[in-house]
Image: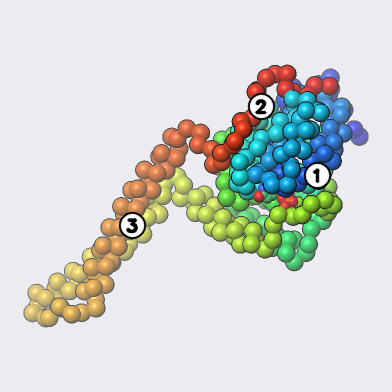
Amino acid sequence: MNTVANLSPATGQVPDHRLSIVVPMYNEVENVEPFVTAVHEALADYPFPWELLIVNDGSRDGTQQALDEQARLRGPHVRPIHLWRNFRQTAAMQAGIDAARGDVIVTLDGDLQNDPKDIPKLVARLLREDLDLVAGWRQNRQDGLWLRKVPSRIANRLIRKITQLEFQDLGCSLKAYRATVLKRVSLYGEMHRFIPAWMATVTSPARMAEEPVSHHARTRGESKYGISRTLRVVLDLLAVNFFLRFSGRPGHFFGGLGLGIGLLGGAILSYLAVLKMFGEQIGGRPLLWLGFFCVLGGLQFLTTGVLAELLIRIYYDRGDVAPYHTTQGPQLAAESAWHQT
Ligand code: UDP
Ligand code: MG
């Protein structure tokens, strides 16, 4: 069955939409032309307007020139965005998401490990089933076993536990999103792999699904990651866990801690005060020091809690503060910049 045909407005199955494809690239000069070509082949009959945003994440190998060349050759629906230094994959994706104008956003890697041919399939599922996220699932992942597949299997299991979301392959970059929902979460660190967890804070898990996609080994260029990323992912996992639990009321976490420790200190000091009333010497006792420390520490945690509450309020009130800087803004958002078949 031809998936693109299924997308046709004539069938009445899929509502009209515009599609933005967002791709981060760092030192991928050899992949630029093959990737842009592969996307055009995959979307040759795509019946809706689409644009391709490729975020050059501070490459130093000619990726920038190659992308500008593709934009010239292919037309304004190919929109390179150049970050002035390497901000890493997540921030690069966020830059593309911010510039995306479509109703549907698809993200994928620019090294052809994800297959652009899967794009129409994910979008069709998203729109037909009225979902907010359809995540690719690399059932046949073509990466090293010990450095990549095993750590990511462990990470996926941990993330499932923490988030209670049934996703098998969170690390797959190929995902389709409803733009309005994706734009309500901001990504930084290595957090693009926790997007379903973040999305679950603004939409129901029932509106997110996983769909098997192809995966290929890298044939050009090099992977930008090694084992150090797995460590960063674990640290991010702890941060995500903390945020998901306490982002609403961080004061509850610090306040509880402060109150507990403060009360302990109060109890110790009261005990010592009673001893003193009965005429005992309490001057040099370690317990006295402990009592003071607990009271002071408790007060510290309480004030930290108040500060955290203030920060959280500012966080939710803040305007759009992007976690990256561009040297060159996205191309003019002209209607003519869409690819239309
Ligand atoms: N990437 C990026 N910035 C970085 C590292 C990677 O934009 O600092 C891009 C990279 O060009 C590729 C995607 O993110 O398009 C995935 O990177 P890579 O293929 O190295 O990761 P792997 O497939 O090995 O997990
Ligand atoms: Mg790759």
Residue under the image location 70 percent in, 34 percent down: 80
Residue under the image location 71 percent in, 37 percent down: 54
Is the residue 199 above or below the residue 3 in the image?
A: below
Q: Is residue 283 left or right of residue 88?
A: left
**Mark 1 burial class by Cα count in 10 Å: few <14, some 14-19, many 20+:** many
Quarter location, residue 95? top right
Name the element at disc 1.
helix
Pick whichever of labels 2 and 3 is earlier in the sequence: 3
Q: Which residue is denoted by mark 3 in the rendering?
A: 301
Give the image location of residue 61, x and y in percent.
Answer: 73, 47
**Mark 2 burial class by Cα count in 10 Å: few <14, some 14-19, many 20+:** some
Of discs 1 and 3, which sits in the foreground? 1
Distance in Å between CA atoms under marks 2 and 3: 47 Å
Quarter location, residue 135? top right
Distance in Å between CA atoms under marks 1 and 3: 51 Å
Task: Work out whether residue 209 or residue 191 is closer to the camera in this orientation and state it.
Answer: 191
Is label 1's Cβ within 8 Å of ligand 1?
yes
Task: Work out whether residue 31 or residue 165 is closer to the camera in this orientation and state it.
Answer: 31
Q: Which residue is denoted by mark 1 in the rendering?
A: 31
Is label 2's Cβ within 8 Å of ligand 1?
no
